[in-house]
Image (cartoon, rainbow, N blue to C red):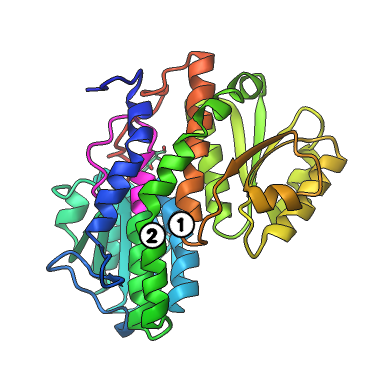
Amino acid sequence: DKGNYRHFMAKEIHEQPEVLGHAISQYLKFNEGKVALPEGNDFDFSKINRLVISACGTAYYAGLTAKYWFEKYARLPVDIDIASEFRYREMPLGEGDLALFISQSGETADTLASLRYCKEQGMTIGAVVNVSESTIARESDLIFPIFAGPEIGVASTKAFTCQLAVLASLAVLAGRQRGHLSDAQEKELVGALSELPAHAMQALKLEPQIEKLAPWMSKKHHALFLGRGTSFPLALEGALKLKELSYIHAEGYAAGELKHGPIALIDENMPVLVVAPFDGVYEKTVSNMQEVAARGGEIALFTDEKGAEAAGVAANQMIILPELPEIVAPLIYALPLQMLSYHTAVFMGTDVDQPRNLAKSVTVE
Ligand code: F6R
């Protein structure tokens, strides 16, 4: 049931404040300012030397974001790869280490094959899944449900942000267990995550402004998304969402990679969508933006007030988000990117809920 929405995707985008609130309530003890795992799924991250993550598509981008978190907050090295490569790589794995598989459906063939490979190597298997009765969940030692509720739109939206919410919680837990976060730091991060629903609500208010970008976007044949740090996986996700929904060719790049090749593409016909909250790497991204502006590229900048002030170059378009704690920024910046691809697709008249050639659950290789 789409309720009052035109598409499931719109409904699922707008459900995010609610489902994020539900997801974090299962992992965070707000009053105590602590992370606590769902019953029966306790895990001690201080016992492992390395975390291995494998997933496909949008779920892989959630894992890529989590790598930054686990490494920063828990000093836990993370190896992550797309499942279709991971399963054939014959990677040496540490017995007893944890392997995490992220999958909305819990049925993705390559992710499942990667899981089985890790199991044979004697690893502990954890599943970050939406469907708790799925094959991936059933074959795992630990289940970390994302509580997004059924996702009908083929393009993942609320599952992505709920995956991130769960992974952020796990990273904070790992940080405390491994002695890299004090109780006070844990409390601060839990406090930040507890504001997710409110921030998501704020981000949804940007919709009319983002909808206005759709006619502009729809005239383009290509688009480049740039981001640094945790905004890099978001740039990849923004590009994936745009290409699958509107069939506009889009690429996501780490902003720092620009001069290593993609800058050759920049001219007045190349829109560049920059994801850059005013964080520790913001200045670096601005200098990449200047390189784009100098070559006539058209820039749409997703940032906050401070970022807008410090931008230094005239971005052609600016979408201003609230100022956010570092750990919640990737989740909230996902929303305007989802809305951009949604409205571009609606404007172009493509099949938003069932883009051509795509299936919701990829159970064959
Ligand atoms: C993109 C999208 C896909 C899935 C991927 C993995 O919007 O939905 O990239 O993320 O096929 O699917 P799951 O999470 O079910 O394993």
Q: Residues within 10 Å of mark 1 (few under 14, many from 20)?
A: many
- Residue lying at the far right in this picture: please name it: 294
Residue 267 in view here: yes
- Amino acid at pointer 2: Leu
In which quadrant of the rendered view does residue 158 lie?
A: top left
Query: Which residue lies at the image location 81% right of the left edge and 29% below the top edge?
Result: 268
Our reading of the magenta stretch's main secondary structure is loop
Q: Is residue 151 magenta?
A: yes
Residue 267 located left or right of residue 242: right
Q: Nearer the viewer, residue 323 or 125?
A: 323
Residue 248 located left or right of residue 309: left
Q: From the top left corner, tell me how far across and down residue 183 is, in percent.
A: 36, 81
Q: From the top left corner, tell me how far across and down residue 127 is, in percent.
A: 25, 58
Query: Which residue lies at the image location 77% right of the left edge and 37% below the top edge?
Result: 265
Numbered label attached to residue 21: none
The region drawn magenta spans 147-163
Q: Would you name the residue on which mark 1 appears?
A: 328
In which quadrant of the rendered view does residue 320 lie?
A: top right
- Position of residue 136 relative to residue 208, above or below, is below
Assign the N terminus to one quadrant of the image: top left
Q: Would you name the residue on which mark 2 appears?
A: 193
